[in-house]
Image (cartoon, helix red, strand yellow):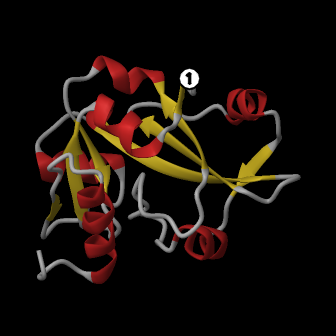
Amino acid sequence: MSSLKPSAQRVQEALSAHGLGLEVREFPASTRTAEDAAAAIGCTVAQIAKSLIFRGKSSDRPVLVIASGANRVDEKKISALIGEKIGKADAEFVRARTGFAIGGVPPVGHLEAPITVIDRDLLALEEIWAAAGTPNAVFRLTPGDLATLTGGQVAEVA
């Protein structure tokens, strides 16, 4: 594991702390977008659990939405669910609050614990893949693992 880039190593450490046996894998090809990740891994775009960071408009808290790569997040649904309007988070906010750059934001290991919402559509899948801290790192998990790791609320997000 020592060959992992520092951000990917941080994710591996967060995963290891949960004792689920999950392992970060780095690819030579980019896994920055859901489409890139699916092509590199050899899975469907729907199996990519993309981590999107939004910004609570009144609380300024990070809001993490973990959505199926095939879905587009409906910000109004998320706002209604958490009881606060949300907006897009810029790259500076994402890095400052999560410790990761856009394109590699994982569902775990953030500097600040976000409000977390998990796309219900991910629960229908046996296996999913999530970003692991860099634009080339991912890890395989089950939807149950994702719920355990994040404590996120499952909801309709698309």
- Quadrant for the C terminus in the image: top right
Percent x, y for residue 131?
A: 32, 56
Residue found at x 76% / y 46%: 86
Q: Is residue 62 above or below residue 80?
A: below
Percent x, y for residue 110?
A: 49, 64
Residue 31 visible in the picture: no
Which amino acid, by three-letter code, is at mark 1? Ala
Residue 50 visible in the picture: yes
SS label for mark 1: strand
**Residue occupying the far right of the picture:** 58
Percent x, y for residue 144?
A: 31, 29
Q: Is residue 98 above or below residue 138?
A: below
Q: Nearer the viewer, residue 32 or 7?
A: 7
| Labels in figure, total | 1
Residue found at x 57% / y 27%: 157
Q: Nearer the viewer, residue 82 or 102?
A: 82
The quadrant in which residue 38 appears is top left
| Residue 127 located left or right of residue 104 | left
The quadrant in which residue 11 appears is bottom left
| Residue 17 located left or right of residue 113 | left
How would you rate the neighbour count of disc 1 (Cα within 10 Å): few for under 14, some for 14-19, many for 20 or more? Answer: some
Q: Nearer the viewer, residue 19 or 73?
A: 19
Percent x, y for residue 84?
A: 82, 39
| Residue 100 located left or right of residue 27 | right
Q: Nearer the viewer, residue 155 or 13?
A: 13
Residue found at x 42% / y 63%: 109
Q: Which residue is mark 1?
A: 155
Q: Is residue 123 above or below residue 118?
A: above
Residue found at x 11% / y 82%: 3
